Structure formats: C-alpha cells, structure tokens
Amino acid sequence: MAHVLVATRSADKLREIQHVLASPGEIELVSLQDVGIHESAEEENLEEFETFEGNALAKARYFARLSGLPTIADDSGLCVDALGGAPGVWSKRFSGRTDLLGIELDQANNELLLKRLEGLPLEQRGAHYLCAIAYVDGDTAASVVRGRCDGIILSELRGTQGFGYDPLFFIPSENATFAELSRFRKNELSHRAQAVRALAGFLARRLDEIQR
C-alpha cells in the first residue's frame, strides 16, 4: 500500500481531506504527527507566495523532502469581491494578530472582515473560497488541482460548525452558512472537497502509472 503524507498542522483540514479521500484502496494517508515531523519555525516562511498554488507547492516540496514520501499540501482562503480579492492568501493572517491561535484568531479575522464590509448591502458582499492542493513525489513529479465555492458574506455570524470564516460564508442554494451545515454536507460542497476530489482522480492515475 502506498503512503501519502498530508502536510497540514490543521486538524480541521486534515479531517476534511481524510473524509473526502476515505475509501478502501491502495493509498493510505498519513499525517505529520504519524511520521514524526514536529513543528518548526522554518514552516512560518513557506507561505510567502502571492498565489494559493505557489504556497501549496512550497509546502508540499518542503515536507516531501523531510519525509521522503509523496506529499500533498494545500493553501486556501477567502476572496471577497468588494475587497479586491482580499484577504486571499493572507486569510489566516488577515487580522495581523500574531499573538492569537485557533478560535481566537478566527474571531479576530471575522471581526475585521465585518468591519471592512460594514454598511455594504448583501448584493455587494459576494465572495468565494479557493483551494489549491499540490502533490509532490520526489524532485520531478508535481501537480496542482483547484477547487472553488461561491457565496456571500453575511453581516453577522451564524452557526457553530466549521472554522475560519465559515460562520460568515453564506451559500444561497443551501440557505445556510458553512458553519450551519453538517460536516458531511460541507464536504460535498466546499472548495477543499472539490480540490480533493480532483486530486483523488490524479492519485489514482499516478498510482496506476507507478505500478505498471
């Protein structure tokens, strides 16, 4: 069975990826914890590119070198039309609060987003989530897939599921925010789920090539 490293420190992202790719087969996903790669200060400098694809590839290449395993890594974020696509690749660092982590950082980011969009009507609050997932196997084989989900930024938080900007990201077709959806339903619709499904097709073809 082929082992593929999922290079993320986010337990939420890891669960989403594992949920979508969870199926009996010839690929076993392993985490950074599984392979004993501990967090280091060097990782903070990996996301220095201006595109999701660039950041995802940088992370995948870095952890592939450390682990010696085929590696997938993602970069994703929220792009708001009225803010010219911001926060974009700076979604996690939008608030500038380097002293916060987890839920507290999410709250600070959401508060700033609400402040920036204050007074705008719903029809001017369009946004989309983007996700790029990179696959790296050795020094030569690399591929990037993308996923996108469109929605609207509400003026108040709704729901308790999910993470990041999920309580503000409203999907009209569902009449709900990401944070109001079940994990199963979110994993059918989300930008990351779309990218992971595209990745699943690529991994199947890649494994077939290796085994020939």
Image: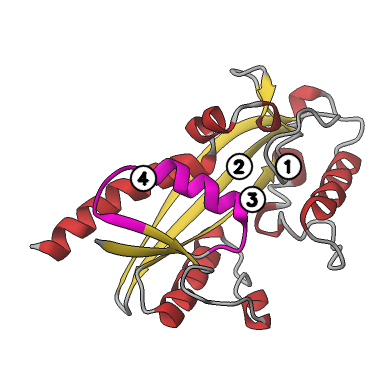
Q: Which of pointers 4 and 2 indicates the residue nearer the eye?
A: 4
Q: Which residue in the protein does label 2 denote?
A: 129
Callout 3 secondary element: strand
> In the rendering, which numbered label is found on residue 198?
4
Q: In this view, does 145 lie to the left or right of 165?
A: left
Callout 4 secondary element: helix
Disc 2 residue type (three-letter): Tyr
Disc 3 or 4, which lies upstream in sequence?
A: 3
Above or below, 50 against 192 in this view is below
> In the rendering, which numbered label is found on residue 165?
1
Q: Which of pointers 2 and 1 indicates the residue nearer the eye?
A: 1
The x, y position of residue 162, in whole percent, is 67, 39
Disc 4 or 2, which lies upstream in sequence?
A: 2
Whether the residues at callouts 2 and 1 have beta carbons within 8 Å, the answer is yes
Disc 1 or 3, which lies upstream in sequence?
A: 3
Q: Distance between the residues labelled 3 and 2?
A: 6 Å
Disc 1 residue type (three-letter): Tyr
The x, y position of residue 7, in whole percent, is 50, 65
Quadrant where the C terminus is found in the figure: bottom left
Callout 1 secondary element: loop
> In the rendering, which numbered label is found on residue 77?
3
Above or below, 192 against 171 in this view is below
- Which residue lies at the image location 83% right of the left edge and 24% below the top edge? 121
